[in-house]
Image (cartoon, coloured by chain):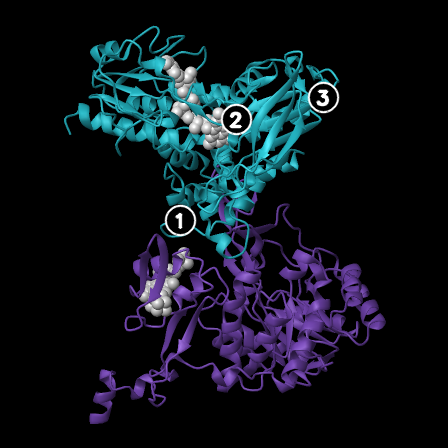
Amino acid sequence: MAEAPDVRAGRLSPAEYERNFADAHPPLTAQQAMVEAVRCLFCHDAPCIEACPTGIDIPRFIRGIQSGNLKGAAETILEANVMGGTCARVCPTDVLCEGACVRLAEGKKPVEIGALQRHAVDWLFERGIQPFTRGPITGERIAVVGAGPAGLACAHALARLGHEVVIFEKRAKAGGLNEYGIAAYKMVHDFAQREVDFILGIGGIELRTGIELGRDVTLGELRRDFAAVFLGLGLQGVHALGVEGERLAGVQDAVAFIERLRQTRDLSTIPVGRQIVVIGGGNTAVDVAVQSKRLGAETVTIVYRRGPEAMSATPAEQEWAKSNGVAIRHWARPVAIEGVDGHVRAVVFERTPLDGAGRLEGTGERFTLPADQVFKAIGQKLVPSAFNGTAELLDVENGKIVVDAERRTTLDRVWAGGDCIAASVDLTVAAVEDGKLAAASIHRYLMGG
Amino acid sequence: MADLRCEIAGVKAPNPFWLASAPPTDKEYNVVRAFKAGWGGVVWKTLGEDPPVVNTSSRYGALHYRGYRMMGFNNIELISDRPLEVNLQEIKRVKRDWPDRALLVSLMVPCTEDSWKRILKRVEETEADGVELNFGCPHGMSERGMGSAVGQVPEYIEMVVRWCKAATRMPVFVKLTPNVTNILAPARAAKAGGADAVSLINTINSVMGVDLDTMAPLPSVHGKGAHGGYCGPAVKPIALCMVGEIARDPECRGLPISGIGGIETWRDAAEFIAMGAGSVQVCTAAMHYGFKIVEDMITGLSNWMDSKGYRTLDDFRGAAVPNYVDWGQLDMNYVVKARIDQDKCIRCGLCHIACEDTSHQSIRKIKENGKRRYEVIEEECVGCNLCAHVCPVEGCITMVEVETGLPYVTWAEDPRNPQRLAKAAE
Ligand SMILES: Cc1cc2nc3c(=O)[nH]c(=O)nc-3n(C[C@H](O)[C@H](O)[C@H](O)COP(=O)(O)OP(=O)(O)OC[C@H]3O[C@@H](n4cnc5c(N)ncnc54)[C@H](O)[C@@H]3O)c2cc1C
Ligand SMILES: Cc1cc2nc3c(=O)[nH]c(=O)nc-3n(C[C@H](O)[C@H](O)[C@H](O)COP(=O)(O)O)c2cc1C
Ligand code: SF4
């Protein structure tokens, strides 16, 4: 353990970087799409539709692919989910639509709904077709805070209904985690920005970047100046491990690391350790693990305190991690991070079987994993600073905003959706649905319905 | 191993699988390859008078369905486009080299007795086993007064067959066109003229589609399309029906049939034989997959015959014919009901929506704690079979016979038939 920590940039050749960060699941060719589309049985009241949080009429768009009506197929998708392009790339389809495919009950592979969805939406994007038009202008102005999936979906739906929308986004670019968080190989060729352009292309949406709620503008001001406010803030804070050594150099927040990776023009400038430990069990843990492996790390180990079923990374994602050479260890939690000269060198874990009541039990039995770099991926939280300078407070539960079924907060004329709400499942597709539902509710409210 | 030898109108072959008169039998090269592969016989591509015809470029159209290629196939080709003498020399050589195989020569010449006499004489010199008069070709040749232009007029058929029978000792097969309202008229005319056998079906008038960019019917030749002849798996039901009509017709009794139309497997062939065919002919399937398909046809038919205890083709030939009846002879008291095997059901809902929207509203959709389930309402089910057909899972929906204890009653005898009462009163 006396060796100096090995954290370096430029571990790979340019060709290796390119290969490792190319499209993880290349698009279907027209012929492949046709063959796959033919496998759809066109179920009545299809279970896949119910399993899609945005309720896309899946058999209908697949029929469009089959008949050569690609435009109709793409419109069916985008009508229900304006981020159908991103969702086709990032949705954990094994637990959503494809998990409900009746082909599984037949003991066969489910129809590749995600890949077909991408085929149709890409077709439309490649041709630069804008299928949406705005309804009659209402003159109502609505503020949307956060240009992530929730905010953009809400803004788009409102603009379609004829309202004027101003989006306030603290970062330099719109897109939220589509731009800053999702794994690079899921969103190649700047897809997030192409989709943002497509969404804003409907008109009636003004995007103001570099403006942060709580710093540059307050909720009170927004409520004064706009007819309604939608909060799509995502989760900007990170949970702490609360163990000794957490402040050592090399102990990093996974989301921040991915953000840097997503924003660089040159992957060879991103330093990565030789031996890496990731703490967590979700999407973020898998993504930081696989991406650091693909940056050239030698060993990457995800350590999660419970069993595989409890991981919020789906079975397919866990499989993806393993097939990328990432080791996953279960039933252990970090108790200390050890360092040399202020830099991390190892993490000490304690085994954590369940006690009789289903709670994690500390056994005192320990093991140590060497590490040059440690990524914390144990979840994000809302930052209270967004509500600085606001007199009236909205209800927050477990650090997330409380909303009703229509996504109304407890504060009059304020709606919220996406990762920042209490009921959130932290998926892009769910954020889109929240934005959609909130827009419908705002519209009903404004039109006196 | 069952005995697959067949004899039809005096023509013998080691098996009933023949290649129909078409591109696969166009020349010595193909026919020799076919015989090497195991085909029992061929009908040589139709010969006509010199000078040979000239074909268009772009000749075939196809119907692909949901990823399956060539469910239906169509062509606008004419008869052999090679000189008569070349064909005759090759036929003679092939027959000499392959004496055990059936070799018929298909013919089509203008509708004069002289023309037929002349060509028959020359064919006889080849020692071929027989001739097949092509009265079926629906395109091109018919515009010149041949092919189906003759086949659609029973009097012409009878006349030409009579000329041919008088002119040759060879067995005369007559190939019938399906482009008629009742296949029995041409079949009976052939018999009356003295035909030794009929072959059917030839292709069906068809347009395969329209190119929506060029607005040309398909297949198209320089932006224009003509109707062509339809064949392939899609036409098999039509062919089987026509074969059955002739097989059960008292007037045609004893007229041998060579069955053609959509035959691709031994099973298709067995069905034609059960419907009365003495041999079968294949074109599209060979054009799709090559001659090798005959291997499985031979072993498949033989294995199936073994499993059924049939030693020769005659043991089951025509076995389905007595069961092929008019609607009026069906049992009105027979009842089947749909039954869904819940263990096999994958909950696609297709049976429900088919019955709900287009049949008898007899499949109930039930949703219990988030799970779908489909149940047949027995009292409502009329036993139409639709649900069983749309169900994508093999063996999930079966149509089960319900014991009614009632006797076999035809519509004529059925109390629900108002005419029956009228008749009884007479
Ligand atoms: C690493 C990672 C990988 C993921 N991978 C997947 C995946 O593969 N599939 C999937 O379905 N989901 C994935 N998710 C989850 C998914 O990205 C989120 O559920 C989704 O982006 C939530 O959308 P949102 O609009 O609520 O929030 P965000 O996408 O976080 O967007 C919030 C936006 O609000 C802005 N903002 C925040 N505070 C303020 C403020 N005070 N003022 C102004 N602007 C503000 C932010 O800058 C951001 O642009 C992943 C998440 C992470 C972290
Ligand atoms: C079950 C069934 C019953 C039909 N009954 C009639 C009928 O009573 N009268 C009629 O003119 N056509 C009838 N048809 C023919 C259809 O109207 C239609 O011409 C034919 O099915 C071809 O169209 P399609 O194959 O493209 O569906 C029937 C078809 C089906 C499948
Ligand atoms: S057989 Fe016909 S009527 Fe009976 S359940 Fe099936 S679809 Fe309905």
Please report whichever mark, 2 or 3, sits nearer to the chain's N-terminal start.
Answer: 3
**Which residue in the structure is indicated by mark 2?**
A377
Cα separation, mark 3 vs mark 1, equals 43 Å
The answer to whether the residue bearing label 2 lies less than 8 angstroms from the nearest atom of ligand 1 is: yes
Which mark sits nearer the N-terminus, 3 or 1?
Answer: 3
The answer to whether marks 1 and 2 sit on the same chain is yes
Give the colour chain A carries in the figure.
Answer: cyan
Q: Amino acid at mark 1?
A: Pro
> Could you say whether the residue bearing mark 1 is in a helix, strand or loop?
helix
Q: What tint does the image give chain B?
A: purple
Question: Can you give x and y, in whole percent of width and height, for residue A157 in the image?
Answer: 31, 26
Which residue sits at x=34%, y=65%? Answer: B375
Confirm whether residue A149 shows in the render.
no
Q: Quadrant of residue B13?
A: bottom right
Q: Quadrant of residue B94?
A: bottom right
**Marks 1 and 2 close (CB-CB < 8 Å):** no
In the image, is A126 to the left or to the right of A12? left
In the image, residue A374 sits, relative to residue B378, either above or below, namely above
Relative placement, left or right, of B211 versus B263 is: left
- Quadrant field for ligand 3: bottom left
For the N terminus of chain A, give its image quadrant: top right
| Pointer 2 chain | A
Q: Are marks 3 and 1 on the same chain?
A: yes
Q: Which residue is mark 1?
A: A47
| Tags 3 and 1 touching, CB below 8 Å | no
Residue under circle 3? Answer: A15
